[in-house]
Image: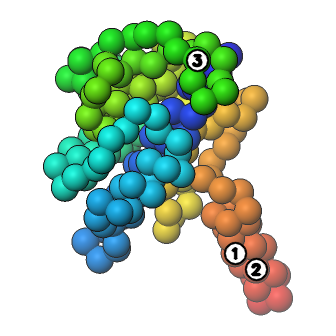
Amino acid sequence: MLITHDTRCALDTVVDLVNTAPEDESSPDGLPDVAALDDFVQNHEVSDVGVLSEADLSAVRAIRGRFATVFATTETRAAASLINELVAAAGTTPRLTDHDGYDWHVHYFAPGASLADHLAADCGMALAFFVVAGERERLRRCEAPDCRRAFVDLSRNRSRRYCDSRTCGNRLHVAAYRARRKEAAG
């Protein structure tokens, strides 16, 4: 599956957006205020964004929850329906652009769109490409019992199980190793 630069950027953005959501009532929100949202926009180099407000924060949190549902669903039809709703509500207006030193690529958001609509359109279309390519199962949640972070499995054989093999994967492998040693010493 060919993943263009702008699609990869949108995938990274949607994964990071989903992962800002609190895991439960006791964990902090990764987007606690407008300043954090502005940092998110800057870190992901989201273009054509004006001054952000509390309304933007609220709207982005709302689409974040809808994107999280896309990663949580096991049904392709349900994921497609959610993506269709997100993209349609954003008022998608595909247009070619070549800005900030990047070659020609497609933006799906309408000029002047709100940040939430911008993210819904561009990130929604990036996820739509995976559904169209029959690769929806690559949109995953970490299998570590204490982690449910979202990620996109871009491994060749679709075998990635953890959001980060150096943290979640390694932690589980070490725990399994110690359990085996303990049992053998028994």
Q: Are marks 1 and 2 in contact (CB under 8 Å)?
A: yes
Residue at the left extreme, as displayed: 55
**Can residue 18 be spotted in the picture?**
yes
- Residue type, mark 2 in image: Arg
Q: How is the image coloured?
A: rainbow
Q: Which mark is residue 98?
A: 3
Find disc 2 in the rendering and name its residue.
Answer: 178
Residue 133 sits above or below residue 9 on the image: above
Decide which of tag 3 and tag 2 comes sooner along the chain: 3
Q: Position of residue 171 (x, y in %)?
A: 68, 70
Q: Which residue is mark 1?
A: 175
Distance from the alpha carbon under mark 1 to that under mark 2: 5 Å
Q: Please say if 60 is above or below 174.
A: above
* Three-letter code, disc 3: Asp
| Residue for point 57% across, 34% down | 9
| Image location (x, y in percent) of residue 100 | 60, 30
